[in-house]
Image (cartoon, grey):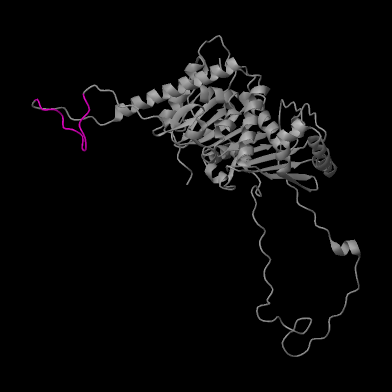
Amino acid sequence: MKPARRFSLATAVSAVLHGALLVGGTCSLGWNLPEFDFELEFEEVELIDIDAEQGEEEAVEPPPMVDGPALPPDGLGPEPGEEEQPEPEPEKRFGDKSARVDKLAPTSSTFYMFMANRRLRKLPYSEDFLEAFSPQYDFQFLVDGGGFHPWNDFEYMLIASSNIADPTQNFIAVSHKLDQGTIKSGIERACRNFDMEIDWETREGKLAGNPRPKDPKVKDDDPRWFVIVDDSTAIYIREEFLAALDGKTEGDKKTARNFVANATRMKRYAAAEPNAGFTLVFKDLRSGLKKAKMPFPAPNDFEFMFEAAESPELLMKIEWPEADEAKQFESYFKEDLKKMINGDIKLKIVAGAFYNAFEIERTGKKVQLRGQLSASQAKSAAELMAGLARKLTETSDDEWQKSKAMRQKSFAERAEADDADEDATAPKAPAATGGDAAPAASGGAAPATGAAPSPKAPGQGETKTMGLAQPAATGEP
């Protein structure tokens, strides 16, 4: 069987949302978030016609033209050096551009999470941040079971879903730096660890396979397929979208082919906001909330952007159907929440600094919360999200340890397989002739026949990730 179904993406996202809202100040929310939908629809600001507001004035006839060069109204031209200077361009701010991650996923998706792994992996709190997703279903299957490490193996990652409470609705796309054999063997390793099997087939030149239970009596309730799209992209996709790979879509279904093609261009989409490490987007959030215990109306649109920096900037864009509802949130944030934090010493210690780090801006029915966290605050926020994930999933210490033990086992199996591949492809020394010993390698003596390779010194060529030694990650250029 695959990992427990209760560890859906909703639990991990709920932890991130609770953590984000705590950092942003709304720390008293008791949300029950079984399903999410969300949409970013930014309406144009309606400009006011001043003449229409003030009424029309009588037209004034201009004075007759006189011979000679035209003069300004005061009859004098500007002094040298006093020419009118162009207006300076507004300073670009983090997150000014809206996320376009919806272009990378099926059009039915209502939730999107995009991570620039190559930016996040270098941060001192990256492992705490990653642990917020460790109870999640696909994480357990691919990381704990398959031995993949999101930071070291993947450059960018997208998770999208039409219902995050159902893991089988998740669409996953990764931009990776692994060869096809490593991807394939990792998925097969995950299947073995969860008593499953997978048969591979080629579809339009792409390797694809559907994991299923080994026991024929066990129902295969996950219709998703792994597809190795090209040398740097792999996706996990529902069966109904396979036609997009085969080129059999038609009519309005041609968008299915678009998202598969766009998934191979994640680096280009990530370049739109070069400092973003993590982006969370909901469409039509209000309709997806079955229960919302909040002191203000539930919003309709939500976007959360986290800068990939040791002292990151955070941005939340929230939109309500009506401006009055946005005003209620603004009033709550500025008055009620501040009063509540200042009135509770424990809450002030935990959330006071976070609250003071944020500024709120409202334009009509849209609200932005923007703040800068210190390095210690960022680590605290990541630890908070990881702890909330365990609490929301009701993960016991025993379950937690079992998952970590499987993860260690999978990493060890992968390392052993990688070493075997290296030994198989390593050039062999020519056999000695005439009774002479094989020549020593340049710069040193030849190793004794049958001798085991010398062990690496602790930390040599390695970096500690999730409590395990992993290959050192390369920085982003």
Residue 398 appearing in the image: yes
| Residue extending farthest front | 345
As drawn, is 437 to the left or to the right of 230? Answer: left
Q: Say if the magenta span includes residue 444.
A: yes
Looking at the image, the residue that sits furthest to the bottom is 67
Q: Nearer the viewer, residue 392 or 13?
A: 392
User: What x and y, as percent, mark residue 317?
Assistant: 71, 43
Is 414 placed above or below 53 here?
above
Residue 344 locus on image (x, y percent): 79, 32
Observer-nearest of 16 and 465: 465
- Which residue in the rendered view is the most extreme toward the top? 217
**Residue at image coords 56%, 11%:** 218
Can you see residue 251? Answer: no
Answer left or right for 431 relative to 244: left
Residue 285 percent across, percent down from the top left: 74, 34
Residue 471 higher or lower than 219, as above or below: below
- Residue 115 x, y percent position in the rendering: 57, 37
Q: Exactly how many numbered labels are in the figure?
A: 0
Magenta range? 435-448
- Quarter of the image for residue 269 reads top right
